[in-house]
Image (cartoon, rainbow, N blue to C red):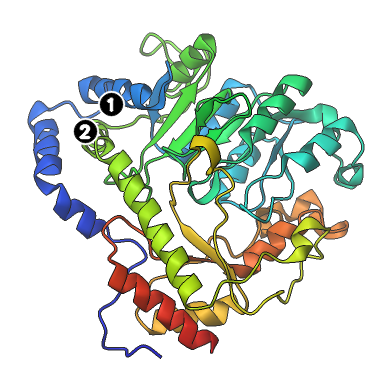
Amino acid sequence: MTPHNNKAIPLLDLQAQYDSIASELEAAALGIMRSGQFIMGEAVASFESDIAAYLGVEHALGCASGSDALLLALMALEIGPGDAVITSPFTFFATGGAIARLGATPVFMDIRPADFNLDPTGIRRFLEGSDTRYQALGVRPEQVKAIIPVHLYGQMADMEEFLAISKEFSIPLVEDAAQAIGAKQAFSDGRVVGAGIEGDFGCFSFFPSKNLGAFGDGGLITVRDPELAEKVRVLRLHGSKPKYYHQMVGINSRLDALQAAILGVKLKHLDSWSSARQEKAAVYNRLFAEAGLVSEAPSCWEQTCGGDCAWHGKGVVLPAETVAANGGSHIYHQYTIRIQNRDTLAQGLSEAGIGNSVYYPLCLHQQECFSSLGYAGVEELCPHAVCAAKQALSLPIYPELCEADQRRVVETIASLLA
């Protein structure tokens, strides 16, 4: 076991990031404080313009959080009671919560185990009517009014296939890109597409731990259709235009000026930070290989999984870069491995002073608040997601992480596995 007196290795070191650009951040914050303009205003408009240019979109609208971005997208689509929205069960709660808050039914479908992202194959089967298992939940294909693919851990879901499904079945796409700003995927026609910009809506989070993080909550929504973009602009301001005249019932979801100024500074560094994360991931991959700890992906990933895997190998399954070819990129919001006896390993790492986290220990369709949906009463519908929830473990990764600390992480895992 690695000695306990070694310095702690955090999962994420925001202090190191701050120290590297402190003068820029402090100048931006002081400028806002001296301006006296704290809500919306020039700083927000400037950031919206800059990030729209970065993403390559026309409409990029700041809001209070990534959770609100999802909610605003569904509100703009007028999703409500009687409607259903398909999404992943293996994600942060906000994705399913936004659907439920509007009175719609979240329909949780399984993931692709290699990259943890929503599997479009199962969705197509359901929409075509060839997968009738969801009838036991009282859900019919014609109720589906939106699909929310989640780009988990910094890697995009299969947007080429999702866009094809969206077009074929006339169902809008709301991309949950909260963890994937700057991630890209290459399409078969040679295009390289960024996260959150090809769907009808793209939803981003600027929670402090994100690759582009604010000094508090913040979010962004990209919108393809100009009329829907204007609708979101109104919805985020209580549904009023002009002020005090309400066309619709909206919410209070504004990106404040201080967060916009901070994000404007950090946006200039985002690409270099993403490159550094990719370099750290490559170092981990090499160190795990040198230690002889790499396990092949289990064969059951290509089959129907029972959702109760004890495991299929003795080592570590490394993150799969399923979008890396031909210009695609994984920006490693998390470096997430799969491993046997995950909870025991996580405890050992914590005792050794090494940060780690489980994203996510319980799938959304298993959460108590969704028990009324009826998933417990039917054959397991999301077995790969259930399996991932038992095995996924995220390790420290951030641009300032040094190779010596990465080596200690891998050596500690080797010791614990031995």
Q: Which residue is rendered at x = 32% and y = 90% of the image?
A: 3
Residue 309 at x, y = what percent?
A: 74, 72
Among the 4 quarters of the image, the one containing residue 303: bottom right
Instruction: Check disc 1: other Cα within 10 Å, few if <14, some if 14-19, many if 20+.
Output: many
Looking at the picture, tell me which residue is in the foreground, 417 or 221.
Answer: 417
Q: Is residue 287 left or right of residue 202?
A: left
Residue 45 at x, y = what percent?
A: 28, 20
Looking at the picture, tell me which residue is in the foreground, 247 or 201.
Answer: 201
Give the mark nearest the N terminus, 1 or 2. Answer: 1
Q: Which residue is rendered at x = 80% and y = 54% of the image?
A: 375
Q: Is residue 286 left or right of residue 386?
A: left
Q: What element carries label 2?
A: helix
Q: Which residue is rendered at x = 34% and y = 27% of the image?
A: 51
Tell me the CA gap for discs 1 and 2. 7 Å
The relative height of residue 373 versus residue 8 in the rendered view (above or below) is above
Q: In this view, does 416 lie to the left or right of 280?
A: right
The relative height of residue 19 versus residue 212 in the rendered view (above or below) is below
Give the amino acid type for the residue marked by disc 1 in the picture.
Phe
Q: Is mark 1 on a helix, strand or loop?
A: helix
Are dots 1 and 2 in contact, CB under 8 Å? yes
Q: Which residue is rendered at x = 72% and y = 31% of the image?
A: 81
Q: Is residue 308 left or right of residue 4?
A: right
The N terminus - image quarter: bottom left
The relative height of residue 190 versus residue 209 in the rendered view (above or below) is above
Residue 321 at x, y = what percent?
A: 55, 50
Residue that mark 2 sits on: 261
Residue that mark 1 sits on: 47
- Visible residue check, residue 58: yes
